[in-house]
Image: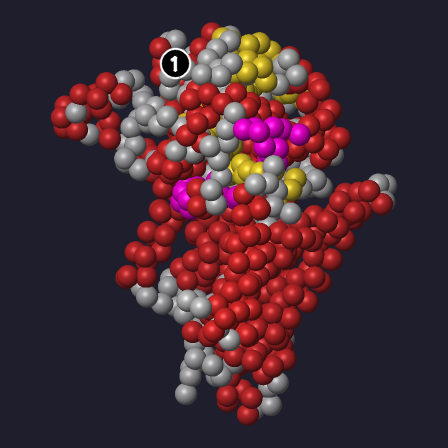
Amino acid sequence: MNLGELSVARKTLLLAVVAAGALALTGCAKKEEAVKIGHAGPLTGPIAHLGKDNENGVRLALDEANTAGTMIGGKKVTFEMQSEDDQADPKQGTIVAQKLVDAKVVGVVGHLNSGTTIPASKIYSDAGIPQISPSATAVTYTHQGFKTAFRVMANDAQQGKVLGEYAVGKLGAKTIAIIDDRSAYGQGLADEFEKAAKAAGAQIVTREFTGTDKTDFNAILTSIKGKGPDLIFYGGMDSQSGPMMKQIKNLGLASKFLTGDGGQTVEFIKLAGDAGEGAYASSPGVPLDQMPGGKAFAEKYKSKFNLEIQLYAPYAYDAASVMLAAMKKADSTDPAKYLPALASIAFQGVTGNISFDENGDIKGGSISLYQVKDGKWKYLETVGG
Amino acid sequence: MEIFSQQILNGLVLGSVYALVALGYTMVYGILGLINFAHGEVVMVGALTALSVTNALLVAAPGLPAPVILLLAVLVAMIACMLLGFSIERIAYRPLRRAPRLAPLITAIGVSILLQTVAMLIWGRQYHTVPALIPARPHTVAGATITDVGIVIIAVSALIMLGLLLLVHFTKLGRAMRATAENQLVSGLMGVDINRIISATFVIGSALAAVAGVLVSANYGIAHYYMGFTLGLKAFTAAVLGGIGNLGGAMLGGVLLGLIESLGAGYIGHLTDLCQFESLRQASLELARNCTGSAEVPLFGSNYQDVFAFLVLITVLVFRPTGLLGERVSERA
């Protein structure tokens, strides 16, 4: 067309379009890139304190990487976190996962609960986005055949086995009552515990069930009181096990109390109060002060957020760090390119050595046992690793 | 037998709280025909307000004896909830007095969500530990254990319910409330200030809710912004069970629901134990393997506790739609 024949308005429009196009093209030649890392966890609800803990761990890792200045593929990369609330609800977990995928995150640290991580993992796998969970311990998560599913701590097959053997071997329990919260995590852990305890020779007197939102356990505890077991095992989170300990003491139940990593938190002691004294719990990995970078991490965390570490923050930090390390190793932020690097990486994290087996589980994971003494978790021993 | 009496005792404690909250639902429904979904949230606000006052007093005046702190906390919580109840009625429900039934119902749900969110913003999302002002010392009664808190709950609830019955049946205000509940229009013509009576109903119900909130949070030692939802639902169920609009019904329904839940959760596993059926054990190898000794394989475990409660409700309503003691709703001309 003949440019001279266009009206003034048309010419202005054409000029504007060309200018915009030029600006866009200059963007392509930028030496900087902003990359999104997704985080998903319960930021509201009974375990919001744990979700926030994870989010803080990821934030710390990303802020450090940004301050240090990371070069990947010849460009300076700034990492942004997109943090979503999955409310520890499996239905919400899949919605949030799709949201993160649509927002084109290059990797996800999450989710927190096994119940949300497992369904979400399918969505990430379909989109080819690597997912590292800092806390989901259910075995199924890495046994679905997804190449993008990883975790940075031991799973419940190991944890349940250690707990079962500890209950019978070290705590001398011959009769055991098991309660779980019917979540993927609680039920899975309780099942593994039952298998191990039975194999070690204990008798399971009863299995009771509750829910992730319940606070009244008097009815099932009364029923258990009637059977008089040596030990009560609970598969679930601290927001239930804390009040449960209180009710156990109020009902005059003399059984020992054992729970998994969901209860090995500062919040458990707060919620149980004096009744929490003497409770046992396990946690994957080693205690914070035995971790290679534990003390330094605790100080960094405290000075940045002015909060105590709840439970999984070091793992969330390591999950984000190992993801960034894989990107540096592959020299690319493209999920398709750095996924193989992640699968074969050997990384020295705050929590210890991180490398993954063919399923995505961490190699050499260990389980530690703790007991509440004088209102604090006292470290007892470590199995495995 | 002692386990049975323990479950009964647990149920009484639980039921007393349900009864207190159910009274609020039933009074409002009796007069306005409205299910005040926000009532559970008023309970929550009462609990959290009392907690804040308690924490503030423990810091500011550590020398005060525990009963005084508790009393002050309850008083402040009651005042706060009464104001809240009054405001809810004025702002959300009064403009909809003449509207079709659905409008105030949905508004009530809206107010409920609003209160939950505001509470979340003020008090945060976490579970708060409630300082044990009433010591949790266990006592043994007939082979069952009950704590001081449990005794206080049963006693306080009983006293309050008695007080409310006296108020409703022997005072002028009570007579006006009963008249308004029976027929709003005619009562108005007889000189009853309808607006004042309706406000009074909400205020009294909210005061009860505040006390219930303090008792519940003291019993479990925790309070959080979402605690009102399930409690409100169960209390409303209790009110319907006993006969909606009927004060005695709310009390009976509350206590009954508490007992049903307790006994249900305790015995449902035992009742539906598949191991007791010889034919099933022979049919399934896995079942036979798991049923060794005194082990039970329940068809419905204790996680069906809530299901049990609502099943009872449905059954009662099927055979007696007006609830156990009959409903009392205003006649609409």
> Can the viewer see residue B198?
yes
- Check the residue under mark 1 and report the chain it is in: A
Percent x, y for residue A98? 42, 44
Residue at coordinates 55% horizontally, 16% vertically from top-left? A347
Q: Which residue is mark 1?
A: A196
Q: Nearer the viewer, residue A6 or B46?
A: A6
Q: Circle 1 — which element?
A: helix
Residue A119 spot, x, y in % from top left: 37, 37
Residue positioned most to the bottom = B189
Q: Which residues are magenta?
A: A69-98
User: Does residue A221 lie above or below B224 as drawn?
Assistant: above
* Position in image of residue A21 (x %, y %): 52, 54
Point out residue A355 in the picture as x, y percentages from the top left corner: 48, 15
Residue B93: image quadrant is bottom right
Magenta span includes A74: yes
In the image: residue A183, left or right of residue B56: left
